[in-house]
Amino acid sequence: MTIFEVFRQERKGQPFAHAGSVVAPDAAFADAWAREQYGRRGESQALWLVPRDAIHQITEWADEFDLKYRRVDGYSIKARLAEARERAGTAGS
Amino acid sequence: MDQRNLDVKTGAFLAYVQEGGQVEATDWLPDEYRQKLVKFVEMHANSERMGVLPEREWILKAPTLQRKLALTAKVQDEVGHAQLIYRIVEDLGKPREQSLADLISGKAKFHNVFHYPTKTWGDVGVIAWLVDAAAIISQKALLKCSYAPYARIMKKICWEESFHILHGRDVILAMMTGSDYQRSLVQEALDRWWGPLMQFHGNPIPREEDPMWVWRIKSQGNEEARQQFLEGYVPQIRELGLTVPDPNLRRNEDGVWEYTEPNWDELRSVVTGHGPRSQDRLAFRARYLEQEKWVRDTVLAA
C-alpha cells in the first residue's frame, strides 16, 4: 500500500493546499478514492496526488552566515535615521 | 536522550502547544502526547464509523426518495470522515487493522449517542439536527488542535457536518409543520435523546485537569462545549413548540445555563459497551469485517 498526500486547488489560479492523504495499492485506486473524498461536492478544481515517499521535506534552517539582510527585520533603521537627522540638524523639526 | 533532556524537551513542547503552536506528523512528539492523541483521535474515528449504524437502519424506511438519498449521502459522509480520521491514527503509528480489532473487542470506545436505538423517523431527525449539532461544537474546537494534520482534515469534516444539520433541521421542520402525530414523534424522540445529549460533552471536569486540554488536543473544556450547545439550540428547540424534558433547565442572568445533573453513571456504562444497542452494533461491525475480507484481500493483491 502507498500513502498519497492529497493537495487540492479550490478555484483556478489558487495555490494547491495540503488537504489530507489516502492510502491505496496503486495510483488508479488512489485516484478513485481521492475523487470521492475530496471532490464529490465539486469543492475542488483540481487535485494533486503525490506519493509520500516522493516528498522531500526541509525543516532545518541554518543561519550560520547571518542572512538577515534579506529580511525586513534585518535592518534597524530607527537609530541610524535619528543619528543622520542629528548630523543634518533636522532632528525634532 | 537521558531523562533530564527528555523532561526539558517535553516541557518545551508543552509550552509550545499551550501558546497555540501546532505540530506535524514528522515532528518529535512526547510519548504521552502521542498516546493521548491516538486515544482521542481513534475514538473520534470509531464514532464516525459506528455513528452511521443508527441511521443506516432508516435508509430503507425513509419516507420519501429525496430523504432516502439525503440520508445515504450523510452515511457516505460519515464513513468518509472515519476513513480520514483513521489515516491520522495510522500516521501516529497504530495500524488500521489494530484499531478495527480494538473497536470490535470493546477495548476502544465510541461516543455514547451511537449506543442507542433509532425508534422512529423522529429519532433520525433529532440525530441529524441535535446530535450533529453537539458533535460540530466539539469538532469546531478541533480546528485549533495542536496536531495540525488532524486540525486540517477537520475543516472538511465541519463543512460536511453543516449539511447534516440542515438536513436534520429540514426533517424536523417538515414534521413540526405536519400532523399532530408527526409532532408527537419529534417530541418523543427529543425526550429520548435529551439525556444522552446532555452527557455527550462529558463530565464538567475543569479544563486544567483535562489532559486533552492540557496538551491542546481539545481547545475547550467539556462544560464550555455543553453551554455553547444549550445557548445555541435550546431557543431553536423551543421556538418550534417543543419542550425540553428538563424542568430545571434555565438561563441565568449571567448567560450560564443551569440544568439537572446529567446521569454520569449511564454515560460510563454506555460507553463501556453496556448501552441498549452496543453489542448488536459491534456484532454487526464484526460480521461485516469478516464478510468483506475478500475485498481487502483483493485490493491488497492488486
Image (spheres, helix red, strand yellow):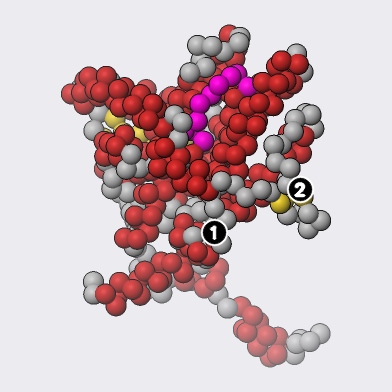
CA separation in Å, label 2 and label 1? 21 Å
Q: Residue B83 at what x, y percent from top left?
A: 39, 33
Residue B120 colored in magenta in the image: yes
Q: Residue at x 54, y 29 (%)?
A: A43
Q: Secondary structure at mark 2?
A: strand
Count residues near mark 2 (Cα–Cα under 10 Å), then give few for <14, some for 14-19, many for 20+: some
| Disc 2 with disc 1 on a shared chain | yes
Task: Read off the residue under disc 1.
Answer: B205
Task: Read off the residue under disc 2.
Answer: B250
Q: Nearer the viewer, residue B83 or A11?
A: B83
Quadrant of the frame with the N terminus of chain A: top left
Question: Would residue B43 be visible to someone looking at this image?
Answer: yes
Q: Nearer the viewer, residue B32 or B145?
A: B32
Magenta segment: B113-122
Residue positioned most to the top: B65
Q: Chain of mark 1?
A: B
Query: Relative to residue B269, is residue B78 depicted above or below?
Result: above
Q: Nearer the viewer, residue B16 or B120?
A: B120
Count residues near mark 1 (Cα–Cα under 10 Å), then give few for <14, some for 14-19, many for 20+: few
Question: Would residue B84 be visible to someone looking at this image?
Answer: no
Residue B179 colored in magenta in the image: no
Q: Residue B112 at what x, y percent from top left?
A: 49, 39
Q: Residue B52 at what x, y percent from top left?
A: 47, 27
Judge from the rendering whether residue B46 lies leftward or rightward of residue B72; answer left or right.
left
Q: Residue at x 63, y 27 (%)?
A: B189
Residue type marked 1: Ile
Q: Earlier in the sequence, mark 2 or mark 1?
A: 1
Q: Residue A82 at what x, y percent from top left?
A: 68, 85
Quadrant of the frame with the C terminus of chain A: bottom right
Q: Residue at x 23, y 71 (%)?
A: B1
Judge from the rendering whether residue A11 lies leftward or rightward of residue B170; answer left or right.
left
Q: Residue at x 45, y 60 (%)?
A: B211
